[in-house]
């Protein structure tokens, strides 16, 4: 069996901001009643993060919890841990209505960082990225040009962007093109 690798191993671009593919990331989709204490408890236990409010991202390093929809959270973890996390969730929530799926190999993640990160991303998404509207600890599911994506801030000048693996090259090229040095709009 061949060794797993991320969508674009080592891909990086430096322009107005730095764009890098972050490598393999474990991801488990957990769908169910987000007001359920057993669901919240197991999500917090396996992620080591506090349960997020709507549009919240509780992420530290490669682990955390992201609110994705009124009935869905995404558990971020080490890639090697995702299968075991699904098994732990299945045991903890047995007899209840839920879905837990390891979606690690279906996604790619990029880190975009630098003082002009908001300007660069604003070229690609309709989401409001003004500092008064979007802060570290929040997540948005939106579009980057023509493809679905989600992003969250890990710091004042750093975003992580998740997309489907099948469009990873397209998203990397979009981000790199938007980050090419040129006169910026200096909107933010």
Image: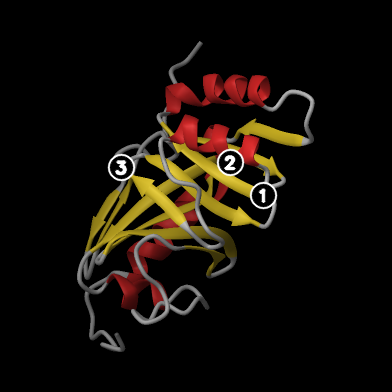
The number of discs equals 3
Foreground pick, 132 / 111: 132
Left or right? Give the position of 9 relative to 186.
right
Left or right side of 76 for 39: right
Q: Position of residue 36 (x, y in %)?
A: 68, 43
Disc 1, disc 2: CB below 8 Å?
A: yes
Q: Earlier in the sequence, mark 2 or mark 3?
A: 2
Asked where in the image residue 118 lies, by quadrant, the reply is: bottom left
Q: CA distance from mark 1 to mark 2?
A: 7 Å
Q: Which residue is mark 3?
A: 61
The answer to the question of whether label 2 and label 3 lie on touching residues, with beta carbons closer than 8 A, is no
Position of residue 181 measured from the top left corner of the image (x, y, whole percent): 22, 74
Q: Which mark is residue 40?
A: 2
Tag in front: 2 or 3: 2
**Residue 109 drawn above or below residue 136:** above
Indicate left or right for 39 with 149 as reference: right
- CB-based contact (under 8 Å), mark 1 and mark 3: no
Task: State the residue at coordinates (35%, 39%).
Answer: 62
Query: Gap between marks 2 and 3, in whole Å?
Result: 21 Å
Give the residue number, with chain letter if any, for mark 1: 35
In this rendering, is residue 120 above or below 137?
below
């Amino acid at each position: 069996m061949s060794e797993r690798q991320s969508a674009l191993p080592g891909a990086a671009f430096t322009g107005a901001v730095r764009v890098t593919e972050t490598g393999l990331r474990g991801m488990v989709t957990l769908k169910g009643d987000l007001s359920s204490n057993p669901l919240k408890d197991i999500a917090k236990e396996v992620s080591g993060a506090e349960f997020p409010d709507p549009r919240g991202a509780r992420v530290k390093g490669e682990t955390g919890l992201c609110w994705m929809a009124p009935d869905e959270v995404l558990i971020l973890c080490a890639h090697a841990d995702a299968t075991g996390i699904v098994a732990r969730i299945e045991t903890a929530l047995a007899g209840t209505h839920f879905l837990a799926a390891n979606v690690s190999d279906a996604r790619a993640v990029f880190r975009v960082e630098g003082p002009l990160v908001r300007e660069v991303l604003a070229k690609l998404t309709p989401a409001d990225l003004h500092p008064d509207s979007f802060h570290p600890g929040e997540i948005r599911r939106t579009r980057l040009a023509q493809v679905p994506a989600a992003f969250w801030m890990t710091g004042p000048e750093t975003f992580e962007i998740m997309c489907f693996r099948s469009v990873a090259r397209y998203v990397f090229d979009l981000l790199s093109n938007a980050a090419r040095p040129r006169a910026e709009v200096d909107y933010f």
